[in-house]
Amino acid sequence: MLCINNKQKAVQSTEHSFLHAVMLDDTEGYFVIGGGKFVRGVEGYFGPIVLYRNRIPSHITSDIFLPDVVKNVNLTGWQQTCHEFRLEMIVKIGGYSQSVTQKTQSETCHDVFHEWKVKAGTKSGEQCEVWEATAPHRRAAAKLAQLLSFKSRGTAVSLPAVGEALYSLSLDKLSHARSSAVVSRILPLLLQAGCLDNIQALHMSSILLSTGLGVHKQPNKVWLLALLAAQRDDRLALLHLGHLHHQGLLGLPVDTDLAYGYYANIAHQTTLDRLNQTSQQTFVEAIYLNNDEVLNHQTNEDHHIFQWLKLQARRGAAEAENSIARMLFWGQQGVSRNIQEAVRHYQRGAVHLQDPVSMYDYGIVLLQGHGVDKDIPKAVTFLKKAKEQGFVPAINALAWYYEHYEQDYKQAVQLWEEADLLGCPEAAMNLGVMYSQGRYPGKPANEYVAYSYFLKSAERGHIRGTVILADIWTTGIPNLVTRRPSDAVLSVKWAAEHNGYLGSVLRKALDSYLKNDMLSSLLYYMMAAESGFAAAQFNVAYLCEQNPGGFLDPVYVSQCMWKYYNQTIQSQNPDTYAFIRMGDLFYEGHGDRPKDLFSAAQMYKLAALRGDPQGWYNLGLLTEEGQRLPLSLLSDLGLSELYLADSNVLPTVLYKRCRDSEIADSFFPCSLALFNVYFKSFQKDYSAAIRISTALAAVAAPTVFLIVLTVLRRRTASLN
């Protein structure tokens, strides 16, 4: 319940009537509170809830109370503050607009009193109106409202326009900052922009308060701001809330069902966003900042790589033509998105170069009207040409055409079956839809067969197929498919992380990094990291570790590395460097935590098993320092027989594996380490012989010196 100025929001009720008989067994299945397939959800909190199985008593005596989470988040307090701020800005905008209008009129028509003052030389002292008085922390907002009013020449300025200006001002201040200390001055501007309906400002504020970057952490406010942004359908806020409930962060309990609700929301929207491309979306690229090779391939329209591709395309290289079109269409590798220009390259590759990939892409944009007017016959022509050259996705696209435009289901499923046998993920997904809806010619609806096709599609990496599969896993199919709620959460999370709005934030982060704007880069990566995106979590930790120019406090650097490298190693496919750095943090001790050599060895082991020579090297160093590796760890490495071996044997084997890894750069340092072990072993085994040899050498040295000197003299004489 939310009250503002003693006014309560309207209470609504909803119901769903089934058109068929329903058998309810409250001892099986699951119970849904809130919205679902049949009942709309509401904006608010559910609970506490009492379920009456048989009848509802005439008198319910249980007291109604607000859960602690609702009290702590203080939604009403936020709404009251925003309501007052909005009223203040409305008054100021009205005043500024009226001032501009009066000034405009006075420029064309001076009254007699004004002309008399000008002739008499009287100065009219300007005085502030009552409505112009502004609290110090709101002066920036008032100044922007005044500026926008003057620019619009008296036309009414909307509150969202002021909010957008506040958000832009915050980003500008951030891009010119040289340390995280400036964040504490930017946060009030972001919160005010959020009050004025700027969703991005709400989400960015929640991230700052969650990470503690330049400000104190406020977990309750983090959740509040994330909820407000998610309520307005901000994709990253939905991801953020899903991550919080999935991992049980900010003091929240782990709740896979609630996490699934958030992830499924954005996953479903991702399938729609990919069909309705906008300039605010960018292809999601998992780029790690420690990968110099990938970073060197980042380009833009003026970069030499892009210009070289254009040259190759003009010379008739179909692959270069298609690469340029793909970069422009999806906004990949640092190239700004330009769908119309991409279509021109698709057309050139299809028409002039007869490239089957370009034919397919050009046919799809013609079929859907992306960057060009729809032309169905022309699209079908190019798709058929691509199919004739054996391009499998074209077979699926033609089947889609026969289903949607010709209603020829027999021809459609025949083509989909053909494409499915060739491994096409879209074909498997479409066959699943046909079976689930009972539209497969000559066959009845079959949920299980549909499920098998959705499963096949998801295993091949299809986003929509994965979303449908996850939906089945949440409920199961009685007697056929058991519920798999944990797998369902991971599946929709994977699908949600392909959203183009997440890709846009990742692109801003990388662009800022390449421009040496480290604070902005860190913040953008944090926005993605707090949504659970593993590559962004790694990059946040890496930026904190590098800390170029010392823009972060040393204490914060240590905490940041611990948090985000720790989160990275818990992802499904972590970068091995994260294992190495977590091992180093365990080895060195972090904050109040003492050294933990056992955990350090476990981290190095995980890196070694993933083929990182640094893992083998660090394990070798631990053994040289006298650390005894556990038998379980050696068993995982396939070295259990060396548990009781001589102290020099194990490091020798570890350094050999380091030296013999596939990474060429490891050969020299690992060989040196191996040589050092050999030298120490030789020194230990033959130390007595070395001492005797040294003594003999000391006695024999004068004699040898005289002999050598005599020989040299003889050689000199003979040369003369």
Image (spheres, rainbow, N blue to C red):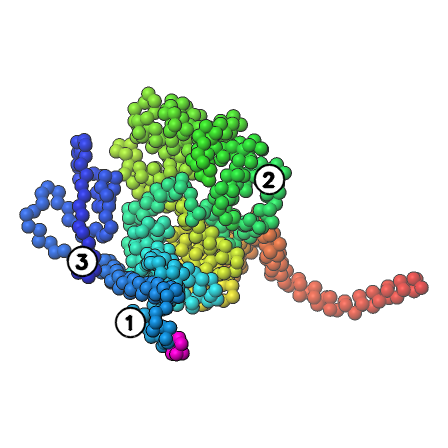
Taking depth in this image into account, of 211 and 666 the one nearest to the observer is: 211
Q: Earlier in the sequence, mark 2 or mark 1?
A: 1
First to last magenta residue range: 118-122
User: In terms of secondary structure, where does tag 2 sit?
Assistant: helix
Q: In this figure, which residue is indicated by the disc labeled 3?
A: 7
Horizontal relation, residue 310 to residue 54: left or right: right
* Secondary structure of the residue carrying numbered label 3: strand
Q: Position of residue 241 (x, y in %)?
A: 32, 52
Residue 589 visible, this orientation: no
Name which residue lies at 57% across and 50% down.
Answer: 302
> Which of the numbered marks, if any, corresponds to residue 430?
none
Q: Amino acid at mark 3?
A: Lys
Q: Position of residue 462 (x, y in %)?
A: 41, 37
Q: Which residue is mark 1?
A: 130
Whole-angstrom CA distance, mark 3 to mark 1, is 28 Å
**In this figure, which residue is indicated by the disc labeled 2?**
313
Residue depicted at x 27% and y 38%: 475
Which is more toward the observer, 659 or 121?
Answer: 121
Residue neighbourhood size for the residue with mark 2, other residues' Cα within 10 Å, grouped as few (<14), some (14–19), many (≥20): many
